[in-house]
Amino acid sequence: MKDIAKRVFDVEIESLQHVGGLIDDVFTTVVQTILNSTGKVIVIGIGKSGLIGKKIAATFSSTGTPSFFLHPGDAFHGDLGIVSKNDVTILISYSGETDEVLKVIPFLKWNKNLIISITGNPNSTIAKNSDHNLNIKITREACPLALAPTSSTTAALVMGDALAIALMESRKFQEEDFARFHPGGSLGRKLLTRVKDLMRTDNLPFIKVDASFTDVLLRMSEGKLGMVIIGDSTHVEGIITDGDLRRALLKNPDTSKLSVTGMMTANPIIVDADEFISQAEQLMMERKITNVLVGSAKDRNLVGVYQIYQ
């Protein structure tokens, strides 16, 4: 089984290298055509090519090129109405003779849409009726019967990825742009979420500087942050964490002799509410702390607390 797996990898890599060698100035023209377009990129294919087309359209859309997939069957039964004159179309068919895809071409020509095709046969009907054809002729399929699309669908997929990356770089698409299209993902959280979006503002555990050890312990339990804040929202003098309490007790088990000023960390770290979560968490990891105060470090006021593990 391992030998079979390695053979499939070898065959598909061989085909990809071959297709890579076929890339010429047509690729550059296709990229420029899409960049110059004021419409969307509509990807059309059926069967395995259709599945690859869906992925290509999704990759385009998430990397700055508005795109969607159109099934040729649906297109031929009414959905062609969503194709505007400014749209660029990409037809995917390895043989270049897929009947369902061919049926869409007359409308695209009538509608004056630019047609780009991805085929394994530059002399096919679809290729000849395209404005630009990207050749993905492979050396062989990984399927031993040469029946199941394997190397050919991989080649189509990678050609789509190559277009997407070329368009990304041409548009100078950055991490921040990607994050805007993926606000629910980890990158979106990292690049878009600010401390004020996740900080806690209710029931902050404030205590006075003259509070007793018992008061500190009770307020820390009530606050459920593993810390208390000495002062109030208008002026913070320091903080006491549960770790500070343990260390103080180890040094002096007599709680009546433990004072707030003796246990607290004066001038604690305060981050701005508009700071990105990623920056705040990086600071917290560097300082090995799980809570950080949110407000103004200059004025020592407080608007909330951000806890890295909630």
Image (cartoon, rainbow, N blue to C red):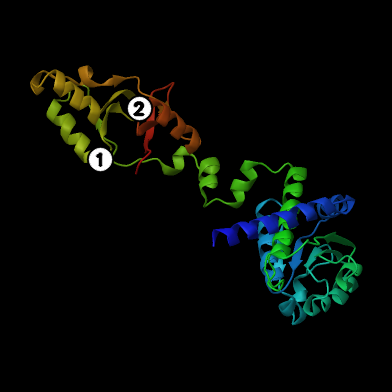
Image height check: is 39 above or below 226? Answer: below
Who comes first in sequence, dot 2 or dot 1?
1
Q: Is residue 212 left or right of residue 80?
A: left
Q: Nearer the viewer, mark 2 or mark 1?
A: 1
* Nearer to the camera, 135 or 200: 135
Image height check: is 203 above or below 150? Answer: above
Q: Residues within 10 Å of mark 1 (few under 14, many from 20)?
A: few
Q: Is residue 236 left or right of residue 173?
A: left
Residue at (12% x, 30% y) in the render: 214
Residue at (74% x, 43% y) in the render: 169
* Nearer to the camera, 86 or 116: 116
- State the residue position of label 1: 224
Q: Secondary structure at mark 2?
A: loop
Q: Secondary structure at mark 1?
A: loop
- Where residue 234 appears, as percent x and y from the top left, is 35, 27
Q: Is residue 144 left or right of residue 195?
A: right
Q: Residue furthest bottom?
A: 77
* Image mark count: 2
Residue at (49% x, 37% y) in the render: 278
Work out which quarter of the rendered image holds the N terminus and state it: bottom right
Disc 2 from disc 1: Cα separation: 21 Å
* Nearer to the camera, 22 or 142: 142
- State the residue position of label 2: 234
- Tag 2: residue type? Thr
- Where residue 289 appears, as percent x and y from the top left, is 35, 30
* Nearer to the camera, 163 or 66: 163
Image height check: is 110 above or below 300? Answer: below
